Amino acid sequence: MSLQTQSKTYLNYINGEWTASSANAVEASLNPADKHEIVGYIQNSSKEDLDRAVAAAKEAQPAWRKLSGPARGDYLYKMANALEKHMDEIAETMTREMGKTFPEAKGETARGVAILRYYAGEGMRKVGDVIPSSDSEAFMFTTRVPLGVVGVITPWNFPVAIPIWKMAPALVYGNTVVLKPATETGVTAAKIIECFHEAGLPAGVVNLVTGRGSVIGQGLIDHPGINGITFTGSNTVGKQVGLGAIARGAKYQLEMGGKNPVIVAEDADIELAVEATISGGLRSTGQKCTCTSRVFVQSAVYDEFKEKLLSKVKALKIGNGLDAQTWMGPCASESQYNTVVHYINKGIEEGATLLCGGNKPEGEGLDNGFYIQPAVFEHVKPSMTIAQEEIFGPVLALIKVETMEEALELANDVKFGLSASIFTRNIGNMLSFINEIEAGLVRINAESAGVELQAPFGGMKESSSHSREQGQAAIEFFTSIKTVFVKA
Ligand SMILES: NC(=O)C1=CN([C@@H]2O[C@H](COP(=O)(O)OP(=O)(O)OC[C@H]3O[C@@H](n4cnc5c(N)ncnc54)[C@H](O)[C@@H]3O)[C@@H](O)[C@H]2O)C=CC1
Ligand SMILES: O=C(O)CCC(=O)C(=O)O
């Protein structure tokens, strides 16, 4: 296989230098659209590599912190410009590494640029308040200080946006960073860091260590030199991060799964609801924590909604994300494909009716990829596995309801609470939904996926650690407040 020998090997980035792992071991990152294509090799790093990265971040932190906020912001502007310059290359790498379509990958990279510019501006905003003291001779105020060294553990589904929405606020508020990206998207992560290097970021301020979750991820959780850990990924690993951080008094922040509902009321714009269900549920092959997975439809419009949905879902073009005709790419990895197939079989076993999809599509160029036809189920009971667990794939469960009260009760009947949508023209329905739905992101006549970078992002219940990322909310995690009382 000639591609194997031509594939580039990507190194760790420690203290401003590209270095191979001391373990002398690499891992291949595969193209899910063609499992025979190796996108690149990344370092399968050791604990020793991690120790060196943490030491470099620790050493760089005092000087970084002593820069003014606007000076740190200037670096972020330069990082944004470098990322923008390499936008097409990075987006193409993302598509080849995890399968999402090139326009989606490009949109995500542009979002990374915008996030860096947003947080660059944050370097000029206030970090405290003056509070009146009961002592009229005293001056009382708050200020904020960085945590120190922050460990960033990220998944493969948004390989540019998620690392950047964690690193950008960490940096602008004066922290230094050790990034451990998902192995599946280690090449994309290395390319982001190449941009930061090109932007002239001082040595040690950002470090990249690729490797196994059980070694490098767990190593970050346990490392005494890591003051805070920010994580996005599965609930199982997220809970381990939280427990490990608590055990040694480190700060932590978790963004995990979703089981996001859409409610379609009988007065809804059905065309809009269908389009948004498809876009929210199936784009990125259903691999977003904000993806629509349960669709509650009022009985009066159920048949109309179902027919329109099915005819559009069946027409979606599946293929390689680099092909301009493709609407939906493959699952990001073989293991993700197997998970989706497992859930589809579980749905059938438990008695739901598979209306379409769920099989491996046939056609030119599809044989070697982890492709799956988007699946739509009906007769889904709220207690079924496919109505309760996060699938992270292109699977929609239709559930017929009589009333809005029933829809709300069932929508809330899961352990997750990330995002939720309603389609209705009735202001009463909208207000009940805003008040009653248990979700951190509440969307009216808009799809469940998609977040704006300047607004708080996070979930209720088991979807997050009850913290919020992005926008100005990020300052809460990446800094500590000092309350200062001054008496002359
Ligand atoms: N909320 C979200 O955005 C995401 C949710 N998921 C969910 O998780 C499922 C499994 O996906 P995975 O990639 O396996 O997620 P994961 O939670 O295993 O991986 C996320 C990150 O955590 C790291 N990690 C793994 N084990 C670790 C450990 N013991 N200690 C510290 N870090 C560790 C991984 O290397 C990766 O960087 C998906 O099917 C989906 O349901 C996955 C990715 C993103
Ligand atoms: O919906 C989005 O754009 C963000 C989703 C997300 O954060 C995730 O899937 O981890």
Image: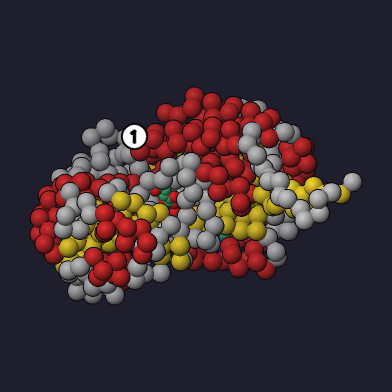
Q: Determine whether 253 is above or below 111 in the image.
A: below
Q: Is residue 418 left or right of residue 164?
A: left
- Residue at horizontal 23 percent and vertical 44 percent from the top: 318
- Residue at horizontal 23 percent and vertical 54 percent from the top: 426
The residue at the far right in this view is: 488
x%, y% of residue 123? 64, 35
Query: Mark 1: is the Cβ under 8 angstroms from ligand 2?
Result: no
Task: Give the structural element (helix, strand or loop) at label 1.
Answer: helix
Q: Determine whether 330 is above or below 420 in the image.
A: above
Question: On the rendered image, what quadrant is the N terminus found in?
Answer: top left
Q: Camera-side residue: 15 or 416?
A: 416
Q: How many marks?
A: 1
- Residue at horizontal 25 percent and vertical 38 percent from the top: 326
- Residue at horizontal 49 percent and vertical 57 percent from the top: 255
Which residue in the structure is indicated by mark 1? 103
Q: Determine whether 1 is above or below 437 in the image.
A: above
The image quadrant that residue 359 belongs to is bottom left
Q: Is residue 419 left or right of residue 144?
A: left
- Say if residue 205 shows up in the picture: yes
The image quadrant that residue 411 belongs to is bottom left
Q: Camera-side residue: 193 or 247?
A: 247
User: How is the model colour-coded?
Assistant: secondary structure
Q: Amino acid at mark 1?
A: Pro
Q: Is residue 76 left or right of residue 67?
A: left
Q: Residues within 10 Å of mark 1 (few under 14, many from 20)?
A: some
The image quadrant that residue 70 belongs to is top right
x%, y% of residue 267? 16, 55
The residue at the far front in this view is: 136
x%, y% of residue 51? 71, 51
x%, y% of residue 484? 78, 51
- Say if residue 8 shows up in the picture: no
Q: Camera-side residue: 73 or 181?
A: 73
